[in-house]
């Protein structure tokens, strides 16, 4: 069974899909990197006003730490979307 299958079973995201996984060594320790992308043709939700809108650009990918698996650190790698919202706040 692949890691993506395990993640889909345990930690499924409605708006995102797991694209790829890779194991790298950083500072003498193993690290799992899981690339996450938004579903195709999906709408984004504004964190301020809650309205749905379309994204137009991706920002530099960042790492978000997840629960370790078998003592190996796991990071989700995600490039957030920039989008236009009617919110002026």
Image (spheres, rainbow, N blue to C red):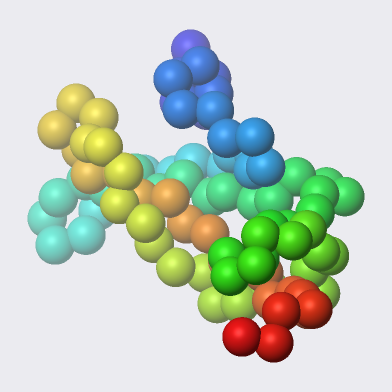
Residue 6 appears in the picture as rendered: yes
At which x and y percent is residue 14? 64, 35
Horizontal relation, residue 49 to residue 69: left or right: right
Asked if 59 appears above or below 13 in the picture, the reply is below
At which x and y percent is residue 48? 58, 70
- Residue found farthest to the bottom: 88
Residue 57 appears in the picture as rendered: no
At which x and y percent is residue 37? 65, 51
Residue drawn at point x = 55 percent, y = 77 percent: 60
Q: Nearer the viewer, residue 27 or 16?
A: 16
- Residue found farthest to the right: 41
Horizontal relation, residue 25 to residue 16: left or right: left
Residue drawn at point x = 25 percent, y = 29 percent: 69
Residue drawn at point x = 53 percent, y = 50 percent: 35
At which x and y percent is residue 22? 44, 44
Q: Quadrant of the C terminus?
A: bottom right
Asked if 27 appears above or below 20 in the picture, the reply is below
Residue drawn at point x = 81 percent, y = 64 percent: 53
- Residue found farthest to the top: 1
Figure label count: 0
Asked if 51 appears above or below 13 in the picture, the reply is below
Asked if 12 appears above or below 74 in the picture, the reply is above
Horizontal relation, residue 27 to residue 21: left or right: left
């Amino acid at each position: 069974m692949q890691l993506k299958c395990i993640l889909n079973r345990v930690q499924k995201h409605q708006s995102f899909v797991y694209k790829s996984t890779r194991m790298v060594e950083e500072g003498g320790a193993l690290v799992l990197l899981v690339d996450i992308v938004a579903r195709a043709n999906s709408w984004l939700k504004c964190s301020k006003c809650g309205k749905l809108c379309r994204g137009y650009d991706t920002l530099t990918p960042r790492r978000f730490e997840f629960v370790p698996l078998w003592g190996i650190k796991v990071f989700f790698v995600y490039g957030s979307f920039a989008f236009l919202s009617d919110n002026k706040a």
